[in-house]
Amino acid sequence: MDETKLEATLRCAFEIARSGRPGPVVVDIPKNVQNANVFFDGACTLPIPGYRARLHAIKNSILNEADCAAFFDALSRAERPLLYVGGGVIAAEASAALRQFANTFGIPVTTTLMGLGAVDTTQPLSLHMLGMHGTAYANYAVEDCDFLFAVGSRFDERVASVPGRFARGAKFVAHLDIDPAEINKVRRVHWHHLASAVRQKFGWIRRTSARCAASQRPNGTIPSWGLRPPSPKPLPRLLLVPPFPGKSNKTSAGRH
C-alpha cells in the first residue's frame, strides 16, 4: 500500500460505509504505512468508478409497469402473502411507506433483528421477529406462506439456516433490495428489483396497483391464517414483586 494514498483510502472507506448498503469497511494498514509521515490533503479520494456507477444505476432504476403487473399477478393469486422486512427499510427511511403498503393490501409483516421498529408490533398485522431468536408464529408463517416479499433483508443464516427449507411452501418469492449481491445469493427468487429509494418504490407499486391489480385484496383485509400473535398482556405480578416475604427484588429477579 502506498502511504500517499492512506488519506484517500480512509475517506473512500467512510464513503462506502455510509452509502448504498451501510455497513463496516475493513482497511488493512501495513506497518510501514503506519510509521510513514504523510501530508494531509483534505479532499483526495480514490477512483472507484465501478462502485459509483453501480450506485448511480440503482438510484435511477425504474420499476416499469410490466414488472408491477407480474408482481400483482402473483399477489392476486396468493392466499397467504407475507412481508419479510429487514434493516434496509429503516436505513432507507421507508417504514411509513411499508406500513401503508401492508395495511393497503392486508399483508402480515415479520421482521429481522435489524428491521425491528419498521412496523408497530401492537398492530394486528405484525408477527414480530422471525428466525432462531424470533417468535414461533412468525416462523410458522414463513413456512406456510405462498407469497413471500422480502424487503431490505438478506436471508441470513439466523433466519434461513437451511436455505432449501426456508419458505418452501412459497410459490412466488419477490425481493426488493439495494445490494445486487444479495439477489439469489441464499434463496432463489422469482421477482426482484434493485432500488435505493424504497419509499418511492412502495408508492409506485401502490399507485400502479390501481391500474393493474386494483381488486385483488380489499383494503384492510387480513388474510385468514389462523396464526395471530397473542394480545399484549401486563407482566405477571410474580415478576414485579418478591414472591416470598423477606426476599429482596434482586433475589427475586435472579430466581425468575
Image (cartoon, helix red, strand yellow):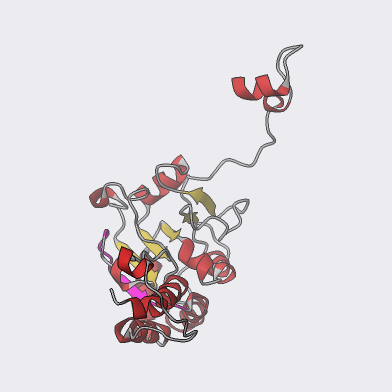
Return the x and y of residue 151 as percentages of the image width and height.
43, 66
- Residue pictured at 34% horizontal, 54% vertical: 156
Query: Over which residues does the magenta segment extend?
Result: 186-196
Give the left or right position of residue 125, taking residue 34 as reference: right
Return the x and y of residue 84 as percentages of the image width and height.
43, 59
Quadrant in the picture for the N terminus: bottom left
Return the x and y of residue 207 as percentages of the image width and height.
51, 82
Is-magenta flag for residue 74?
no
The residue positioned farthest toward the top in the image shown: 245
Return the x and y of residue 104 as percentages of the image width and height.
55, 69
Q: Is residue 177 above or below residue 169?
A: below
Is residue 256 in view? no
Is-magenta flag for residue 192?
yes
**Within the image, what quadrant is residue 139 found in?**
top left
**Within the image, what quadrant is residue 44 found in?**
bottom left
Q: Is residue 244 above or below residue 26?
A: above
Between residues 84 and 61, which one lies in front from this camera angle?
61
Q: How many tags in the picture?
A: 0
- Residue pictured at 39% horizontal, 68% vertical: 75
Q: Is residue 38 above or below residue 156?
A: below
The residue positioned farthest toward the right in the image shown: 246
The rendered magenta stretch, by its main secondary structure, is classed as loop
Between residues 144 and 189, which one lies in front from this camera angle?
189
Quadrant in the picture for the C terminus: top right
Q: Is residue 91 above or below residue 200?
A: above
- Residue pictured at 44% horizontal, 42% vertical: 133
- Residue pictured at 46% horizontal, 84% vertical: 211
Is residue 185 in view? yes
